[in-house]
Image: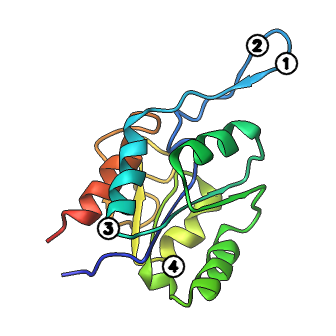
Amino acid sequence: MKKLPKLILTDIDGVWTDGGMYYDQTGNEWKRFNTYDGGGVTAAHALGIPVGILTGEKTRIVAARAAKLKVDYVVQGVRDKLAEAQTLCNRLKINLSDVAYMGDDLPDRPLLEACGWSAVPKGSYLEGKVPVTLVTAKRGGEGCFREFVETILNHE
């Protein structure tokens, strides 16, 4: 039986969103988030487990969503997610084996392979291409992050 993680990290695009990039005629970017994923943050926090976002994108949209949900760590513009996660682990004095991570694409692969718990959304690019703890029943943007967190917290 695995112990609970000490930190839960996640990508955004393709996990909390459907991975689409939406622009209006004036150049504004839009992202659609599923409110169910906020329940994953709440559930982790209820057990004292911090949550962090690691994303290659850099937008005010992600910062606003993270602030609303009181996400503990937000790192945008990340080029090497494994290195960023290791830096955070060093700061928190934990190991990568204590981390749960959910991602969906090639930049996520090294971290998915290194952490203790790992997941990809159903239908993601990495499904079947990297060994993970869980392939969620839900697709990105459909509440798959919450499904991942609930699976971890209810694993016993």
Q: The residue under label 1 is which amino acid type?
A: Gly
| Among the two numbered marks 3 and 4 on one chain, the one whose residue lies closer to the N terminus | 3
**Residue in the picture at 80% in, 21% down:** 28
Q: Residues within 10 Å of mark 2 (few under 14, many from 20)?
A: few
> Which label is found at residue 27?
1
Position in image of residue 6 (x %, y %): 42, 77
Quarter of the image with the N terminus in it: bottom left
| Mark sitting earlier along the chain (1/4) | 1
Tag 1 near tag 4, CB within 8 Å: no
Res. 90 in view: yes
Secondary element at image label 2? loop
Foreground mark, 3 or 1, reads: 3
Task: Give the CA separation, mark 3 to mark 4.
Answer: 23 Å
Q: Amino acid at mark 4?
A: Ala
Total count of labels: 4
- Give whichever of 15, 128 is nearer the camera: 15
Distance from disc 1 to disc 4, alpha carbons, whole Å, reads 38 Å
